[in-house]
Amino acid sequence: MIEGPAPVCSRAGCRNAARWRVEWRNPKIHTADRVKVWVACDEHREFLRDYLAARSFPVAVAPLDQAGAPPEARQ
């Protein structure tokens, strides 16, 4: 469960409540154990995933409430 204020979508200019975790890393500069997380609203989930995937970054999307879920449980 997330404590504190509700997370806001990471898409520039968006102030919607985030419902998704977009987990990624840049393999040129991050080791396999270093994962960065953006959060996304329903509207921008695919945009953020596609943005990262187009750069050939490993990316996984999961509901915010599944933080720490194994990769096979993610979309």
Image: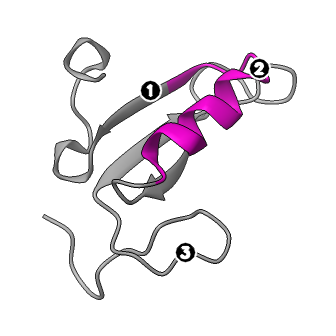
**Amino acid type, residue under disc 1 in the picture:** Ala
| Residue 33 position in % (x across, y down) | 56, 26
Are the two marked residues, 3 and 1, in contact with CB atoms closer than 8 angstroms?
A: no
> Which amino acid does the dot numbered 2 rest on?
Pro
Label 3 and label 2: CA atoms lie apart by 27 Å
Quarter of the figure that contains the N terminus: bottom left
What residue is disc 3 on? 14
Q: Residue at x 61, y 19 (%)?
A: 58
Question: Which residue is outermost to the bottom?
Answer: 5
Are circles 1 and 2 on residues that touch, CB within 8 Å?
no
Q: Nearer the viewer, mark 3 or mark 2?
A: 3
The residue lying furthest to the left in this view is 1
Q: Earlier in the sequence, mark 1 or mark 2?
A: 2
The residue where tag 1 is placed is 60
- Say the numbered circle drawn on residue 70: none
In this figure, which residue is indicated by the disc labeled 2?
Answer: 27
* Label 3 element class: loop
Q: Which kind of residue does numbered mark 3 sit on?
A: Cys
Stretch of the chain drawn in magenta:
44-59
